[in-house]
Image (tube, rainbow, N blue to C red):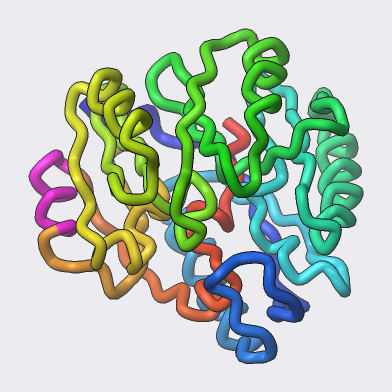
């Protein structure tokens, strides 16, 4: 069974994309080819549109290089957005621009309290549950607030490897009963929890996880994956009926972001 196709997404044009600081182990300052990054982003947008997804674009502002990672900005559900509370000061200004975009496009705005750090890439829907990766970007206190404001069950997963600092680096929901995960990114109790809750749970190899396989983007029976993932991962995807689309995201990896990080699902 495939998931419902995505209808509408928000992405940010990487006009000023660079890496100017280090807030995760992947970041490589002053190495980004901005023109190449823009071409990679345009290739992603072309695939999204080929899948009949309406693509909304927010323009990047100067001096906020990570603004390109639209998924980080919050959770959109039922016409409302729950905005991120960025832990790092380098990213906090991004929120202002996205807040205005959502307001201008008639989304209801919601917030967590200032004590709860939270980013959208740490929150992934699976069936009727929201899994939240805690430890590096999202705080434990955010889970209770998320459950209350979204009116749904929220399950925290403890991340233990800073290389996989957000949940979408190690967990990839496919549909209502299938997901991939990289066990070593999580605590043993979190691994056990996933094995109990996900009927068809596939293990990602270290090679696949480090190639950003978990940071792929799923829409119905289609999946967009980064180039360079191992063949066994692609075989597993085909075995569960997914059509694969591959793109190069090498420039965005220099900031620690992948395909899923670049796309926020609006509906």
Q: Position of residue 64 (x, y in %)?
A: 82, 67
Q: Which residues are magenta?
A: 233-241
Q: Residue, x 48% and y 59% (percent of image)?
A: 259
Q: Quadrant of the C terminus?
A: top right
Residue 234 covered by magenta stretch: yes
- Between 8 and 33, which is closer to the camera in this rendering? 33
Q: Position of residue 115 (x, y in %)?
A: 83, 31
- Check the image and report above or below for 91 versus 200: below
Q: Residue, x 82% and y 38% (percent of image)?
A: 102
Left or right of 186 on screen, residue 69: right
Residue 240 covered by magenta stretch: yes
Q: Position of residue 251 (x, y in %)?
A: 54, 80
Q: Position of residue 96 (x, y in %)?
A: 91, 48
Q: Residue, x 65% and y 58% (percent of image)?
A: 69
- Say if residue 49 shows up in the picture: no
- Between 9 and 151, which is closer to the camera in this rendering? 151
Left or right of 152 on screen, residue 99: right
Q: Quadrant of the N terminus?
A: top left
- Say if residue 17 shows up in the picture: yes
- Between 8 and 154, which is closer to the camera in this rendering? 154
Q: Main secondary structure of the magenta part?
A: helix
- Check the image and report above or below for 131 versus 135: above
- Between 129 and 98, which is closer to the camera in this rendering? 129
- Check the image and report above or below for 17 versus 234: below
Q: Residue, x 29% and y 19% (percent of image)?
A: 197
Residue 215 figure quarter:
bottom left
Residue 143 figure quarter:
top right
């Amino acid at each position: 069974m495939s998931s419902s196709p995505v209808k509408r997404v928000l992405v940010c044009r990487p006009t000023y994309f660079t890496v100017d600081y280090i807030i995760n182990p992947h970041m490589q300052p002053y190495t980004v080819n901005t023109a190449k990054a823009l071409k990679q982003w345009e290739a992603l947008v072309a695939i999204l549109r080929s899948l009949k997804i309406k693509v909304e674009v927010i323009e990047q502002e100067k001096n906020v290089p990570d603004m390109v990672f639209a998924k980080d900005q919050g959770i959109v559900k039922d016409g409302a957005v729950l905005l991120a509370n960025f832990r790092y000061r380098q990213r906090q200004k991004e929120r202002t621009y996205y807040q205005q975009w959502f307001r201008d496009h008639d989304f209801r705005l919601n917030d967590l309290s200032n004590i709860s750090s939270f980013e959208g890439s740490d929150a992934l829907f699976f069936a009727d549950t929201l899994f939240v990766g805690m430890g590096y970007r999202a705080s434990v206190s955010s889970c209770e607030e998320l459950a209350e404001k979204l009116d749904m069950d929220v399950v925290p997963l403890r991340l233990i490897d800073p290389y996989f600092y957000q949940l979408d680096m190690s967990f990839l929901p496919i549909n209502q009963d299938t997901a991939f995960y990289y066990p070593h990114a999580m605590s043993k109790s979190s691994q056990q929890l996933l094995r109990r809750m996900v009927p068809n749970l596939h293990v990602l190899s270290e090679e696949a996880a480090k190639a950003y396989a978990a940071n792929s983007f799923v829409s119905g029976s289609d999946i967009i994956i980064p180039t360079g993932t191992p063949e066994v991962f692609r075989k597993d995807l085909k075995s569960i009926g997914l059509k694969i689309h591959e793109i190069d995201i090498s420039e965005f990896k220099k900031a620690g972001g992948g395909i899923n990080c670049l796309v926020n699902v609006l509906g």
